[in-house]
Image (cartoon, helix red, strand yellow):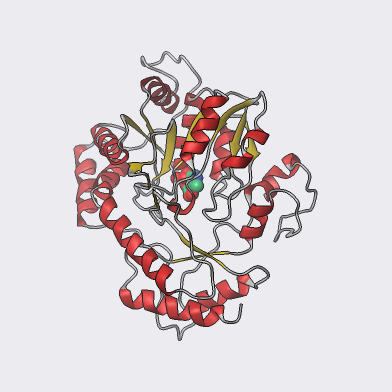
């Protein structure tokens, strides 16, 4: 940021209030730090928020997704369909379950997996589809569920960014299994942490086993499981945060609405009819051919915590070098805009910019963001 910038507006402002501090102190004073009664309370509250029968707390969003995949019956060498336009954990959670990610392109308006392209990617090894509710906007779950049911494959929502997002008034998290992240920058958080939700008793029981060394009865391990548990210390923060989620999501939504009405020269994010985004990110798209990176740098120089989520799609990441289907261009530093694979993902990767939309952005900061974006957008 330049020293002359009028504001310094971070992308995220994790909130830690007196309630969080006191809740953590109560756990520390109780002497019981690992998974215990506070995790149970947090799970009950989270299930209420998602209107699901079960919520199962884990150590992170990544372990929530891996646990959900394994609990849904994904086995080594199975294939799991995911979008490449996401945080890397969407793919690494699949790799942790020793399965292979298969990438399907996204739709332009919501940045989410394109349901019309999913069936072409299904093979006899496909065991699950894992759409992502990216930036807090739900994927097209009705259409995706119909495909999963038709092919008898599991459905797992990567809801890491979508606490409280809704489709027709129903919160996400209940379509099969879902994994949420409670990392510090999320709409609600526990520092690190994750949560699985489902309405299915058997899947919930499987997930509890995977989370805890594959055992029901102590020291008898029925399936391969791990230590993916949450601590009561983390859960104490999560309990307090869950009480404020609705208020914070409303504030994010007000900010987003304000940007939608006032930004010029860039494409503002779209919300599908009947869907409610929780605006984990507010992501604009610059016109094709613009110098997006210089635009972002100028915003940052002016004290606006603008950011690109994500600068390199997952299928172009060096870690998956050997699995790229047709593209052999090295994508390690910057990537090939002409890459033929997954064209919508490639196109949007070099056009998206996220602006601070967190609930603590003030009215003055909002005005400043609008004014600065609109001025800079004239040069795009
Ligand atoms: C889309 C998505 N999936 C999965 C994860 C993984 O969550 P965690 O960082 O809690 O492991 C994240 C976290 O940012 C995410 O954004």
Q: 355 and 25: which one is in front?
A: 355
Taking 150 as reference, is 275 left or right?
left
Taking 94 as reference, is 232 left or right?
left
Q: Position of residue 43 (x, y in %)?
A: 29, 35
Q: Position of residue 133 (x, y in %)?
A: 47, 46
Q: Residue at x 57, y 81 (%)?
A: 378
Tell me if residue 123 comes above or below residue 183 in the rendering. Answer: above
| Residue 74 visible here | no
Q: 372 and 208: which one is in front?
A: 372
Q: Position of residue 186 (x, y in %)?
A: 40, 52
Q: Residue at x 48, y 58 (%)?
A: 270
Tell me if residue 152 comes above or below residue 299 in the rendering. Answer: above
Q: Residue at x 64, y 63 (%)?
A: 350
Q: Quadrant of residue 195?
A: top left
> Furthest residue to the front?
273
| Residue 180 visible here | yes
Taking 295 as reference, is 358 left or right?
left
Q: Residue at x 58, y 23 (%)?
A: 75
Say which quadrant the C terminus sits in.
bottom right
């Amino acid at each position: 940021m330049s020293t002359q910038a009028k504001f310094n507006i971070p992308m995220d402002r994790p909130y830690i209030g007196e309630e969080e501090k006191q809740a953590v102190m109560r756990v520390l004073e109780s002497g019981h730090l690992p998974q215990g009664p506070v995790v149970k309370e947090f799970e009950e509250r989270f299930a209420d928020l998602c209107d699901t029968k079960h919520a199962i707390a884990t150590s992170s969003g990544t372990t929530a997704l891996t646990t959900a995949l394994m609990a849904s019956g994904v086995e080594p060498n199975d294939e799991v369909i995911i979008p490449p336009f996401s945080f890397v954990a969407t793919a690494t959670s699949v790799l942790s379950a020793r399965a292979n990610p298969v990438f399907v392109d996204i739709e332009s308006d919501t940045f989410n997996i394109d349901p019309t392209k999913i069936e072409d990617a299904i093979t006899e090894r496909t065991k699950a589809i894992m759409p992502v509710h990216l930036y807090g906007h739900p994927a097209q779950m009705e259409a995706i569920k119909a495909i999963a049911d038709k092919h008898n494959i599991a459905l797992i929502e990567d809801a890491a960014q979508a606490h409280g997002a809704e489709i027709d008034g129903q919160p996400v998290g209940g379509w099969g299994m879902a994994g949420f992240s409670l990392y510090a920058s999320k709409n609600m958080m526990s520092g690190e942490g994750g949560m699985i939700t489902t309405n299915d008793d058997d899947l919930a029981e499987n997930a509890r086993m995977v989370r805890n060394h594959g055992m029901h009865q102590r020291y008898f391990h029925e399936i391969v499981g791990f230590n993916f548990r949450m601590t009561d210390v983390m859960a104490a923060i999560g309990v307090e945060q869950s009480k404020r989620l609705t208020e914070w999501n409303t504030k994010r939504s007000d900010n987003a609405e304000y940007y939608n009405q006032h930004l010029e020269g860039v494409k503002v994010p779209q919300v599908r009819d009947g869907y409610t985004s929780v605006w984990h990110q507010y992501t604009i798209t610059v016109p094709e051919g613009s110098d997006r990176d210089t635009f972002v740098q100028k915003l940052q120089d002016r004290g606006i915590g603008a950011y690109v989520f994500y600068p390199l799609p997952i299928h172009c990441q060096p870690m998956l070098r050997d699995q790229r289907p047709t593209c052999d261009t090295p994508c390690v530093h910057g990537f090939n805009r002409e890459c033929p694979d997954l064209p919508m993902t490639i196109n949007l990767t070099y056009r998206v910019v996220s602006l601070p939309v967190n609930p603590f952005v003030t009215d003055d900061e909002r005005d400043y963001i609008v004014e600065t974006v609109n001025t800079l957008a004239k040069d795009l």
